Image: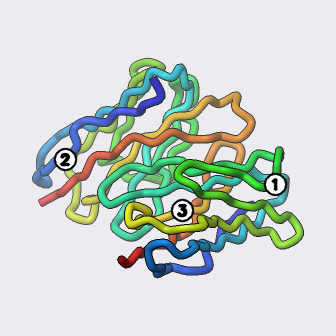
Amino acid sequence: AQSVTQLDSHVSVSEGTPVLLRCNYSSSYSPSLFWYVQHPNKGLQLLLKYTSAATLVKGINGFEAEFKKSETSFHLTKPSAHMSDAAEYFCVVSGYSTLTFGKGTMLLVSP
Amino acid sequence: DTEVTQTPKHLVMGMTNKKSLKCEQHMGHRAMYWYKQKAKKPPELMFVYSYEKLSINESVPSRFSPECPNSSLLNLHLHALQPEDSALYLCASSQPTSSDNEQFFGPGTRLTVL
């Protein structure tokens, strides 16, 4: 069985400041982990994925995530937020044929 | 081509109507998925097709009827829906043999049931 916990339902930052979106996972085996972003009324876009290679994963639009097995975490970071980053972010763990989604974190970016 | 396309983008239907949602991909993926997403919630899996055969049905009511005519197409037939079925319906695809099950999502169909 597997599960995902996104620790914050909303995160508010100012433009130009760092972003941290937190995710903890539970899995009975070595998982694949993803971060997807969803802008309003749009589909899901893959930001980055971890698949047991490097523990620091770089994604699109300047986002990064670090896989920490000892902490069962996969937090998403970005050094400097842009207004266009405002969206819903989902942390996802992959099972054999299905995905388990976290509840999502809404990122709000103010000027 | 790394896109999943969905038509229509928006659909409004009455409770007695019959309509269909369509999804298409040309990435050679042999697994395709339907998800339902309510506002401010994560997507919920409805159906999985693997090699054009239904492999997972997450106890979805029979008023939703999926169909996979070929490896590139996935349909969702709708009949006698309820207002609570109003949601964003997302299609996704993946390669069943991939080690990580990365799924590629379409833009969704926004369904409103009156």
Residue drawn at 12 percent across, 50 percent down: B13
Reading the image, the residue beneath label 1 is A55
Measure how far apart labels 3 and 1 are at the Cα level. Answer: 19 Å
Under circle 1, the secondary element is loop
For residue B51, side relative to residue A58 (left or right): left
Q: Residue B102 carries which label?
A: none
Other residues around mark 3 within 10 Å, as few (<14) / some (14–19) / many (≥20): many
Pinpoint the chain carrying mark 2. Answer: B
Residue drawn at 52 percent across, 52 percent down: A61
Measure how far apart labels 2 and 1 are at the Cα level. Answer: 40 Å
User: Mark 3 touching mark 1, by CB under 8 A?
Assistant: no
Reading the image, the residue beneath label 2 is B10
Other residues around mark 1 within 10 Å, as few (<14) / some (14–19) / many (≥20): some
Pinpoint the chain carrying mark 3. Answer: A
In the displayed structure, would residue A102 be above or below residue B54?
below
Under circle 3, the secondary element is strand
Pinpoint the chain carrying mark 1. Answer: A
> What's the amino acid at mark 3?
Phe
The residue closer to the viewer here, A14 or B114, is A14
Other residues around mark 2 within 10 Å, as few (<14) / some (14–19) / many (≥20): few
> What's the amino acid at mark 1?
Thr
Of labels 2 and 1, the one closer to you:
1
The residue closer to the viewer here, B2 or A58, is A58
For residue B22, side relative to residue A26 (left or right): left
In the displayed structure, would residue B93 be above or below residue A46?
above
Q: Position of residue A88 (x, y in %)?
A: 44, 65
* Quadrant in the picture for residue A22: bottom right
